[in-house]
Structure formats: C-alpha cells, structure tokens
C-alpha cells in the first residue's frame, strides 16, 4: 500500500497530450486553444462612428460655427461618404464608417434638428470625439489570443471577427466508464430487495460532461471470463478506461485478476487513504490508462476528484485546480494512520476566510451525504485529533 503522495506522483508520470483536432468555433467554448489568433486586418478596420449623430470638421466648431446644414445620411454598412462643404455635416449612425473630410461626431442628444439644419447645444466638444479610430485596438497581423487559452465567449467573438471559423484545440480523449456488479440495475428499473440502481457511472459521466467530454458506458457482471473478454475489446477501443467497483478483496472482485491476465501493468493498488483505499491504477499495452475505482459511492467520487480530474486537466492542458486552506470548525478524531478526506460544508467569515464544517455521514456508501457537503478537507496522516481552528487543504467539488 502506497501513500497519497506516491500515488499522485505515479499518476503524474502518465500525463500526456492527446493531440490536436480542428473543430468549428461554434463548438469551441471550454476547449483549450492550440494556435495563436491574429488580426487579419486593423481593428477596427476603419474609423468607426460610436454614436448616432452628426459628423463634421472640428475646426468649423472651433471657428464658432454652431449651425450646420445636413448634406446627407451615412448608415452603417454603406460605403464611405464625403462631406463636400467643411461648414456642413452628415448624419451618421453607430458602426458606420466616418465620412471623408470629417473628424468629430456629436450625438443626437446634444443637437436640435429642424428642416435639415442642425443647432449644436454644446459650448465645448473634444476634437475627434465619438470616433473609434482604425487600428486603435489591434494592428493587422498582431496577435490577439495566445495558444493555451481556455476558449470563452470572448475568444469566440475574436475568432468570428478575424474570420477563424475552424479552430485548433486540444483533442478530447475517447473514454468509457464501466460499472460492475450483479446487484446493479438501470435507473429506470424498479430494483428488487437485493438490488440497487447504478449511480457511480452517471456521476462519473456528469463529471466528464462538465469538462466537455461525452463518455461511453458499459457494464460488467461478476463473471471473470466475461470481464476478461469484454475488457480485452474495450482496452483496444478506448484511451481512458474508468471502472467502478470490483477492486477490493471480495470473492467477486475479479478486476485485478482480469487486468493482470490482459497484461495491464499495475502501477499501484491500494492507497493509504480513507475513503478510497482499494483504488487501482495501471497502463494497458494498448496505451489505455486505467482508473479502477472502489465501488462505494463516496470512495469512487473522492478518487475521481482527487486523482482523475487533476490528471485529466493536465492532459488537456487546462489550468491546475487550486487547493486553498480552510479552517476546521469542529474538533475531529480519526485514528487510522491514513490520509482522511473529510466531507465538509463550506462557508466564509467576515475576513473572507474559508470555513469547513464536518458533515457526518454513514461511511463510504452514503452517497446522499455528498449532497449535503461541498468539498473534501484533507487531514494528514500522523495525527489523531484535528482541532477546531486548524488549517487544512480543501478540495472543492462544487
């Protein structure tokens, strides 16, 4: 049995890049950009009017002119117009190109217009006001977005602006989540007295969906020959295999034996932690990474959050999750020499510090208790009493 730190180090050594794929920018939110985005022309590409109003020459106003004749109207999306008389003006709309021979815009709210004549109601204005000048944001060929950025709606807007309808992003791996055990039935079935509905597989699938991955699912009954036969096919087809259950010491926990018979390299089995001690991790000859999680719901969920999610994020080149410290709000005793992941409810004090109140459950099978908690508080080995007011790392799952 290895320590939590050793398990994390072993898993970290298997981090790898899944490569690059090209997708529509419309589907790219949340993905990691794998190319730089450049301006294909100046931004804005022309002197852009930013207010509905009139465009004219500032020097005419400086000479004392406050009355201007309207020569015409320049709507957005029309070719550039030209002011013919320097003491006249053109009506302009937001987004339109600033007419030739004009440099300043006054909004309609500061004007009185009658019969094609404008009276300016202001005593002072700024030269070149209400004009967004060509290239003011970015010059042509300048970098706007750097590779490695997580694509948000802001980056989608940039991609559209520079004409990038197809983007290079980190490829998502092909993943399958496998439930095990004869006691499990589908969620739309009515369980018999000795059966339960599947939950771990759906919780894991939801976790992956949060990261933009749609995983396949499968189920293995408690039959060693069937398990070996099905896993042999699965390991050829998928890059990541997540298995829930079948890794402890029970008579029907066949997974370690089955994986060994398929020459899947066991990198570790069992970690000095609670919950989740039976966690199994390995690498198949096909290259598939295997996370075989304990079947108890809290154990499965904890191992997913502590080990799998950080590993996946690093593979996808997503930012690492931050684990701040929280203040324990109640004395807690834990005798086994194991790292204890305590379920806690989170709140904050007036100083903005994170407070962690233990949520008592009924062991690693109490999946309902996960709903009441918000995070795991990591309590280290080597202690029995963890006192109220002490600081410990907190891992959020909300």
Image: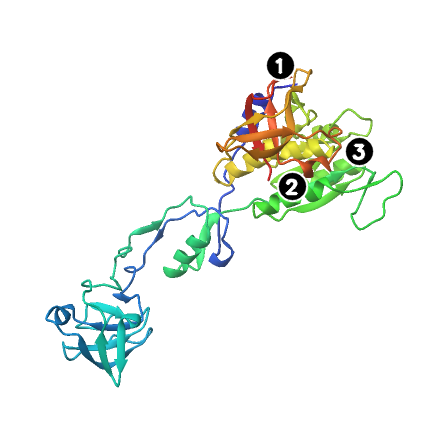
Q: Residue at x 69, y 31 (%)?
A: 299
For the question of whether residue 237 can be seen, the reply is no
Look at 46% across and 54% down and name the residue there. 153
* Residue labelled with disc 2: 236
The percent position of residue 141, horizontal first and vertical second, equals 28, 54
Image point (24%, 69%), residue name: 105
Residue 68 higher or lower than 373, as above or below? below
Report x, y in % for residue 85.
Answer: 14, 79
**Nearer-N-terminus badge (1/2):** 2
Q: Which residue is mark 3?
A: 224
Reading the chain from its start, which is encountered first: label 3 or label 1? 3
Q: Which residue is mark 1?
A: 383
Residue with the most extreme bottom position: 115
Marks 1 and 2 sit apart, C-alpha to C-alpha, by: 44 Å
Drawn side of residue 248 relative to residue 84, left or right: right
For marks 3 and 2, give the one nearer the viewer.
3
Image side of residue 43 versus residue 182, left or right: left
Q: Identify the image quadrant of residue 356.
A: top right
Give the vertical position of 207 relative to 95 (above or below).
above
Q: Answer yes or no: do the residues labelled 3 and 1 have beta carbons within 8 Å?
A: no
Mark 1 nearby-residue class (10 Å; few <14, some 14–19, many ≥20): some
| Image position of 259 with respect to 156: above or below | above
State which tag comes first along the sequence, 3 or 2: 3
Residue 379 seen by the camera: yes
Q: Nearer the viewer, residue 76 or 284?
A: 76
Residue 300, which numbered label?
none
Q: CA distance from mark 3 to mark 1?
A: 41 Å
State the image coordinates of residue 287 (x, y, percent, origin top left).
59, 36
């Amino acid at each position: 049995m290895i320590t939590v730190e050793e398990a994390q180090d072993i898993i970290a050594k298997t981090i790898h890049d899944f490569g690059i794929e090209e997708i529509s920018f419309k589907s790219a939110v949340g993905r990691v950009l794998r190319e730089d985005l450049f301006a294909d022309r100046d931004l804005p590409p022309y002197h852009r009017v930013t207010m509905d109003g009139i465009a004219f020459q500032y020097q005419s106003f400086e000479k004392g002119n406050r009355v201007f004749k309207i020569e015409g109207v320049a709507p957005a999306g029309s070719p550039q117009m030209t002011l013919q008389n320097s003491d006249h003006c053109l009506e302009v709309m937001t987004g339109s190109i600033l007419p030739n021979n004009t440099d300043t815009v006054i909004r309609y709210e500061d004007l009185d217009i009658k019969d094609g004549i404008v009276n300016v109601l202001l005593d002072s204005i700024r030269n070149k006001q209400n004009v967004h000048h060509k290239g003011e944001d970015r010059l042509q060929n300048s970098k706007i977005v750097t590779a490695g950025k997580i694509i948000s709606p802001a980056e989608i807007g940039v991609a559209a602006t520079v004409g990038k309808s197809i983007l290079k992003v980190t490829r998502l791996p092909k993943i399958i989540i496998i439930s095990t055990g004869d006691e499990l039935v589908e969620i739309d079935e009515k369980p018999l007295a000795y059966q339960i509905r599947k939950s771990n597989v759906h919780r894991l699938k939801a976790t992956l969906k949060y990261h933009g991955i749609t995983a396949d699912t499968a189920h293995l009954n408690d039959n060693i020959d069937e398990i070996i036969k099905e896993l042999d096919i699965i390991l050829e087809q998928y890059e990541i295999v997540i298995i829930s259950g079948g890794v402890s010491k029970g008579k029907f926990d066949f997974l370690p034996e089955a994986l060994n018979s398929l020459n899947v390299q066991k990198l570790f089995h069992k970690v000095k932690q609670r919950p989740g001690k039976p966690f199994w991790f390995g690498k198949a000859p096909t290259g598939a990474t295997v996370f075989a999680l304990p079947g108890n719901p809290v154990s499965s969920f904890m191992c997913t959050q502590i080990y799998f999610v950080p590993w996946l994020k690093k593979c996808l080149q997503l930012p690492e999750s931050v684990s701040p410290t929280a203040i324990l709000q109640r004395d807690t005793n834990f005798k086994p020499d194991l790292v204890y992941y305590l379920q806690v409810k989170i709140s904050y004090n007036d100083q903005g510090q994170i407070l962690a109140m233990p949520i008592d459950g009924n062991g690693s099978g109490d999946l309902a208790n996960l709903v009441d908690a918000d995070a795991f508080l990591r309590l280290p080995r080597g202690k029995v009493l963890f006192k109220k007011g002490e600081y410990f790392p907190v891992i959020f799952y909300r």
